[in-house]
Image (cartoon, rainbow, N blue to C red):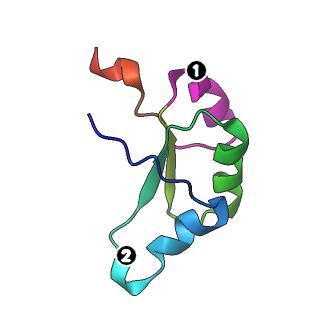
């Protein structure tokens, strides 16, 4: 199992996909478990940029605020 564990600024997440060299980036999975960060990414995302949670605990809350789904740890069980 691999994890990047890279800290990102929420306002830069979707801006990366707008750069010509990175147009294949279509979204982000946030497994931080930090709901404030997740909400901030949603607030700063550009149209068409997907944001999913990697936390089963935050799935419902993330959908309520506009998240696009989950790739959670229990989906592999």
Classified by dominant secondary structure, the portion drawn in magenta counts as helix
The answer, for residue 58, to whether it is visible in the render is: yes
Residue 34 appears left or right of 2:
right
Q: Residue 41 in the image: x percent, y percent?
A: 64, 54
* Residue 62 is a magenta residue: yes
* Residue 43 is a magenta residue: no
Q: Look at 34% across and 21% down and name the residue there.
A: 75
Q: Residue 31 in the image: x percent, y percent?
A: 50, 37
- Quarter containing the C terminus: top left
Task: Determine the secondary structure under disc 2.
Answer: loop
- In the picture of the structure, the residue carrying the numbered disc 1 is 57
Boundaries of the magenta span: 55-68
The residue lying furthest to the bottom in this view is 20
Q: Look at 39% across and 85% down and name the residue there.
A: 20
- Quarter containing the N terminus: top left
Identify the mark at residue 23; answer none if there is no mark: 2
**Mark 2 Cα within 10 Å, few/some/many (few <14, many 20+)?**
few
Q: Is residue 52 above or below residue 10?
A: above
Q: Residue 54 in the image: x percent, y percent?
A: 47, 34
Q: Nearer the viewer, residue 73 or 67?
A: 73
Q: Look at 28% across and 21% down and name the residue there.
A: 76
Q: Are marks 2 and 1 in contact (CB under 8 Å)?
A: no
Residue 73 appears left or right of 36:
left
Mark 2 vs 1, N-terminal side? 2
């Amino acid at each position: 199992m691999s994890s990047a564990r890279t800290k990102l600024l929420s306002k830069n997440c979707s801006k990366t996909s707008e750069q010509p060299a990175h147009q294949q980036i279509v979204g982000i999975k946030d497994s931080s478990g930090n709901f404030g960060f997740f909400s901030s990414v949603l607030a700063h995302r550009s149209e068409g940029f997907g944001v999913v949670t990697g936390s089963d605990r935050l799935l419902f809350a993330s959908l309520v605020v506009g998240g696009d789904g989950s790739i959670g740890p229990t989906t592999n069980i």
